[in-house]
Image (cartoon, helix red, strand yellow):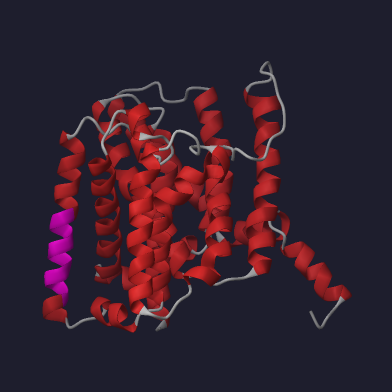
Amino acid sequence: MSQTRFYRFDNIRFILIVCVVFGHFLEMIPGTMSLYLYRIIYSFHMPAFIFISGYFAKYSRKKILFTFLYTYLLFQTIYQLFERFVLNPQQPFRFQFTYPYWLLWYLVVMIFYYLLIPIFDDRRYYIRIIFIAGSIVLSILAGFDWTIQYYLSLSKFITFLPYFLAGYYVRRSARIQQFLNNGWPFYWCKILLMLGIVCISCLYLWKNTMIIPAILHGSNNYQLEGYEPMIKFILLIIGASWIILFLFLPFLDKKIPFLTSMGQNTFPVFLLHGFCIKLASKYNIFQFTPRENLLLALVLSVVIVIVFGNPYVGKIFQRIFTGNWILERMKKVNPKQ
């Protein structure tokens, strides 16, 4: 795999993290346009992030313990303290770690996905197809369950599992890599085809008012949110269509000044921007016209990504807010480790 291929994923990450921050701001902005943009963004941004996570995933007990579990426990504690002393000081308070605080669900599902990699890591194509098909069926069936939902983010874990598996297998499939890097004439036909499908999906999300924001979160069941399994299946296809389009777009395959480097530090942006979102909601900063609110949200999103996503903050974040410092001390105590 060439280095430019990794630039593609850094560039995609930058686009996605801006969408994540912007999407969270959109929750505070009333209006038809903000709701439509919210539907579009939530139809692909986390599916694509999960896909990329699967693409680069490799079983590692150290990563599970010190990147995901340690960071989850730390931020679950910090966010709960932030909620108690800054956002809602009058509310009853108790620590808990079985229901991830808001955006921390990502860390929990990553723990589960990485723990399952030894099971999923099979070279046989028919086994991989069975796993992918089974994960899609499981994702659809999860919508009938009333019990899992937010507990340990199990509903999200099941809902987004097809994307993680797809990313994991795409990286390890020579046939798919060849398909993604095919000759230019056919290559542009594939781009136009996927662009058309994505445009149709945007029209579908515009017209189908049944798709409310809660449906796109992947946590609640069909009866509670009032939608059908077919809609969830269509949403799976929409997410996959965006991912394929991102993989085809030629201009993303190069190192782009500023954008690529920011895309290499999306982890701190994802975990730290939540404080900004919560404060913006507490102080109700979106009090202008709908267009002005959308513009303000977009500008703030880019600023937040620049502040938290620059390499300097990334280095500090890795040293303080992940378990890397524990690994460094372990190496000093036992250099052979």
Task: Label the magenta part by its dominant secondary structure.
Answer: helix
Q: Residue at x 46, y 43 (%)?
A: 155
Residue 322 in picture, x, y percent from top left = 69, 57
209 relative to 2, above or below:
above
Q: Residue at x 29, y 77 (%)?
A: 176
Evaluate whether residue 57 shows in this view.
no
User: Foreground: 61 or 89?
Assistant: 61
User: Foreground: 201 or 263?
Assistant: 201
111 relative to 144, above or below:
below
Residue 19 placement, left or right of 34: right
Q: Residue at x 40, y 36 (%)?
A: 297
Q: What span is colored magenta in the figure?
A: 187-197
Q: Residue furthest right?
A: 333
- The part of the image, by quadrant, that contains residue 330 is bottom right
Residue 213 placement, left or right of 79: left
- Report the quarter where the N terminus lies: bottom left
- Report the quarter where the C terminus lies: bottom right
Residue 90 in picture, x, y percent from top left = 68, 15
